[in-house]
Amino acid sequence: MSRSLDFLTEALRRLPGVGPKSAQRMAFHLLQHDREGAAMLSRALYQAVDTVHHCAMCNTFADTEVCELCADESRDRTLLCVVETPADQMMIEQTLTYKGLYFVLMGRLSPLDGIGPRDLHLDKLIGRAADGVVNEVVLATNFTNEGEATAHYISEMLKARGLKVSRLARGVPVGGELEYVDAGTIARAMLDRRSA
Amino acid sequence: MSRSLDFLTEALRRLPGVGPKSAQRMAFHLLQHDREGAAMLSRALYQAVDTVHHCAMCNTFADTEVCELCADESRDRTLLCVVETPADQMMIEQTLTYKGLYFVLMGRLSPLDGIGPRDLHLDKLIGRAADGVVNEVVLATNFTNEGEATAHYISEMLKARGLKVSRLARGVPVGGELEYVDAGTIARAMLDRRSA
């Protein structure tokens, strides 16, 4: 029909979660109803590929050599929080309970997907954590199997270098009713109980 | 975090069916794992916006003044099939049962969405159908309420100009078991029964 349209449909399939039908629907929509949006997306992609790289300190996405957060002099430089993704970092920032710096893994150990320690650039994390200023590393990877394994691996690695390592607390979620919380979480909350 | 990343996330939301979380996931994925795909999508969008327009004859998306199908001399120019979208046209082409030309509405009458006869460029369809060569117009809009209303409106419009108009047959789908077919379809199949 139209080569440019076929090429666009093909390219849209590179987006995660977009199959052939969705890609076609997206292409039709953009060309029929939102050419301005299509042009904007084209520019945004070009600009992002051109300017976004990884912060030299925390490894998150940044336009500058060092990201804004790492450059912020008011943050506590003795604390380093390790998260899987920039989205996780944002969630922690929203809680306003943490004033230290971050290290963003941009992934997790996942042998099934072929992601080993080398793919996560853990050497960069070691260099960062062993800068002589960082006093405690808070592991805030997800509480999934892969996140837990990643936390365990990093914990062993950093403790071997004499660093203090902590992990986010596990337990019953705020607002949680015991009747509806899974047994594993309750078991963990019981083991980790604290004086009231 | 990164202005370029924010801009990209914002732009991805212009795609139909993509909310804030999906847009973020897409942006992260492209920047972390598929920058080549991002660059390709950027080029595809730019090229599509730049080159894709509507075929002067059938109104579908095309890179050339007249699309390949309309330019194909082997097609029967006395038959004109009206469909809602290029995707519908492709489905009919796949059946290999139709050798005429098409007119693609690029939509349907939908008063609730504010799409009236004028938005569908029905004047272009009239001009096309009344070229003196077209002998029969086959209405192949969807069998939804909106598709049926669109077919009815176009049918009245073309019949008033003395054109022969037909509609795709309704009935029990191939492989359909009466027990599981809805009553409306069976009723229609009964009314439209044909000699065996």
Image (cartoon, coloured by chain):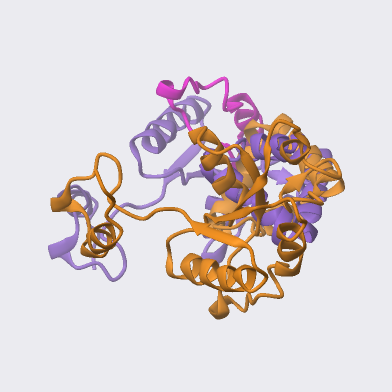
Chain colours: A orange, B purple
For the point 46% across and 46% down, the residue is: B140
Residue A180's spot in the image, x, y percent? 17, 52
Q: Position of residue B39 (x, y in %)?
A: 81, 53
Question: Is residue B73 in view?
Answer: no
Above or below: residue B48 compared with residue A168: above
Closest to the observer, B186 or A8: A8
Residue stretch rendered in magenta on the structure: B103-131
Left or right of residue B162: residue B192: left
Give the side of residue A47 with respect to residue A155, left or right.
right
Position of A145 relative to B133 (above/below): below
Say whether residue B112 is magenta.
yes
Location of residue A34 (image quadrant): top right
Q: Is residue B57 magenta?
A: no
Quarter of the rendering occupied by the N terminus of chain B:
top right
Q: Is residue A155 left or right of residue B38?
A: left
Residue A187 visible to an observer of this rendering: yes
Can you say which quadrant of the picture contains the C terminus of chain B?
A: bottom left
Task: Name which quarter of the figure residue B147 lies in.
Answer: top left
**Would you identify the image quadrant in which residue B134 lies?**
top right
B143, above or below B73, in the image = above
